Amino acid sequence: MQLTFWGVRGSIATGGPQFMRVGGNTTCLEVQHGNERLILDAGTGVRALGDKLMRESRALGRKVDARFLFSHLHWDHIQGFPFFAPAFVPTSKIQLFGPRGEDGVTSLKAALAQQMSPPSFPVSLEAMASNKHFSTIDDKDELQLGPFSVHMRRLCHPQGVLGFRIEAGGKSLCFATDTEHAEGGELDESLLELARNADLLVYDAQYTPAEYRGENGTGPCRRGWGHSTYEAAAMIAKAAGAKRLALFHHDPTHDDDMVEAIEAESKRLFAASFAAREQMTVRL
């Protein structure tokens, strides 16, 4: 099993020369095992992934068959889907699994359709001619998607989020973005369950500890915003027995130098940690 990061930013995409080493696209990950793949979230990074899938389709003479898992419906995790080229091709088969919104009514399909409705977007979801199938997922659900076994738990984020444990070929990945661990609180048992002995834990480390607390002129306190720090990431990786830790969902104000400084601090706490970077591939 291998993982490729196509978008590693949180909240909003960012650009400029000071962000080129880490990348500025919002959340999108590609998990592959053999010829099968899962796509985790559809932030702006999914556009480049879609272009890659189209090139592969033409070169190999086969149709695009894609499975999406959505952690939640916030805009930075769905905003790239209107630019996912395979979704406009009639021969493409796309399965989309996502939770309902906090109201218990809004579905993944409705959220994707809403962002493609006037006056926000000129092309409707219905104009995407691919064969699309939507399914709702929730806390404690389990899926078998080709070679991938997927377990999910609700984590701590405003309006909700699902964390995933994905297993294939004897390897395991925990994807825990947009989640918060309260300082001084007990560890989230749901998160520990997903991350237990994982070959790789991908964890939200958007803020520094000072930013999280609103100290040293870093702006407002971020407690309750649903994001975490590299300190919490290292603590959870240790407690869960994870083999490696990928710091993820980088703040849009953190340039390359800042992310690399955070990475160095994290390595002092958990040596097998690294900052996720756009188009980085990790083999498990």
Image (cartoon, grey):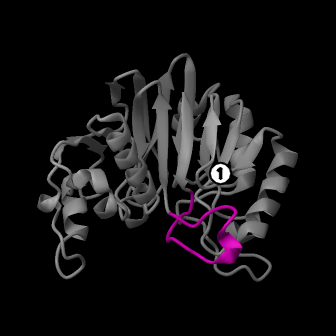
The image quarter in which residue 217 lies? bottom right
**Chain part drawn in magenta:** 8-25
Q: Main secondary structure of the magenta part?
A: loop
Residue type (three-letter) at the residue carrying disc 1: Ala
Q: Residue furthest top?
A: 170
- SS at mark 1? loop
15 drawn magenta: yes
Residue 28, above or below 56 = below
x 40%, y 37%: residue:
38
Residue 107 in sight here = no
Q: Nearer the viewer, residue 58 or 186?
A: 58
Few, some or many C-alpha atoms within 10 Å of disc 1 (few <14, some 14-19, many ≥20)? many
Residue 175 in sight here = yes
Percent coordinates x, y for residue 120 in the rendering? 24, 79
Left or right: 27 as drawn, with respect to 97: right
Which residue is denoted by mark 1 in the rendering?
276
x 74%, y 35%: residue:
238
